[in-house]
Amino acid sequence: MKAAILRTLAQPFVVEELDYLPPAPGRVLVKTHATPFCSTDCTNWAGKFGKVPPVILGHASIGEVVETGPGVDSVAVGQRVLVPGTPECGRCYYCAVGRPDQCSELFDNPDGYPIVATDAEGNEIRASGNVGGYAELMNVSQNQVFELHTDLPSEVLSLLGCGITTGLGMVFNSARVRPGETVSVVGCGHLGLWTIQAAKVAGASQIFAIDPHPGRRELALKLGATRAIDPQTEDALEVVRSLTGGRGSDHSLEAAGPADAQELSVMLARRAGTVVFSGVKELGTMVNLVQTSVAVQGRTIMSTQNGNVRMRRDIPRYVGLLESGAIDATPIITSRYPLEEINEAMHASREYRDLSGLLVFGSSR
């Protein structure tokens, strides 16, 4: 099967044929339907987040089970499955305490990401995020595949494994936005736009969208934001406070990445408000916060990984929101690429030409 391999950091992906390993006990082979090119992989490509070549990037995908290893009982050949960015083993400490977003199968693996294939010279190839979605085939743990029961196309459903789960989860699971509350969203890329749509579903009375990109601010307004703010020409803090009785928003959700976006997010939240961080720029980035804003003013500051989702609980709800039209993927999917054009997908993401560019493999149903 073909895969796009990152062989050298900050150099073009190389598309080549690989020999995939047969599924070991507890693992499955999934034929890929579609994989979003996530902006996070621009950071990975540049070598700023610790990836070690040769590696297949792509940490969330969708496809069809084509082979199962011994002991697999959660899915069967022929089923369409989501392969999200986070497994749920159900056995580790974090799954046991109700935080499968921190599952040890992803974060506590001393041997690194799994070896899933070999190249023509016999070199071992690993799969980033235990997924390796920039390929025609994925060799993944059965704990990282979830059957879907819907007629929605795979192109739309492929967004569930990262952008939708993180954006909606920030609102529903982390901030727990209630009707009538106010929400600031810092960053209006694909993640921020999902967050805005979720805040609208939650009944937020005001949704402030903060982003320097005019096209993204315009789309944010169409998808539910009540006020769009250009931080390069306006004082976002002043605008939000002026429209919230001088307090700031009840919830401030960061979906951008840079440290200054997270610092702004803290200040946008009112005293005793909630702040949720989701972005990462590169390993070792430091965030500087005013001490009184975190020690005296009662804000709850938390992080979210994949929206703190519990897949079996949350995915059916999120699919239902897509089916009903309460959230809309149409404006988020901005381009489609064959695997051979992955470098164009990467540049389109880096240059802010794409919100979500999809790598599409054959029929996406």
Image (cartoon, helix red, strand yellow):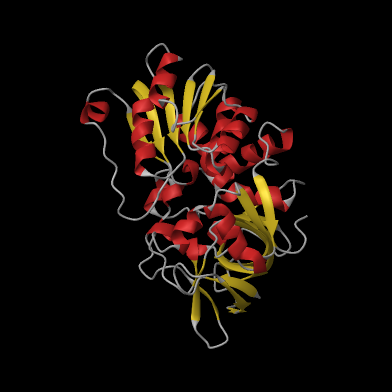
* Residue at image coords 42%, 65%: 51
Viewer-proximal residue among 264 and 325: 264
- Identify whether 3 is placed above or below 156: below
**Residue in view at x 41 percent, y 11 percent:** 245
Q: Is residue 264 left or right of residue 65?
A: left
The image quarter containing residue 298 is: top left
Q: Is residue 20 left or right of residue 360?
A: left
Q: Is residue 153 left or right of residue 126?
A: right
Depth check, front residue: 365 or 197: 197
**How many marks are shown on the rendered structure?**
0
Query: Image quarter for residue 290?
Result: top left
Residue 233 sits in which quadrant?
top left
Q: Which quadrant of the rendered structure holds the C terminus?
A: bottom right
Whole-percent x, y for residue 331 in the image:
68, 40
Residue farthest toward the bottom in the current orientation of the protein: 121
Q: Is residue 189 at least partly visible in the picture?
A: yes
User: Residue 250 placed where, x, y %?
Assistant: 42, 21
Q: Residue at x 39, y 24 (%)?
A: 237
Residue 209 rendering spot, x and y as whole percentages: 51, 29
Residue 164, compared with residue 39, is above or below; it is: above
Q: Residue at x 77, y 46 (%)?
A: 151
Reply above or below: 57 against 198: below
Residue lying at the far top in this picture: please name it.
Answer: 245
Residue 74 spot, x, y in % from top left: 61, 58
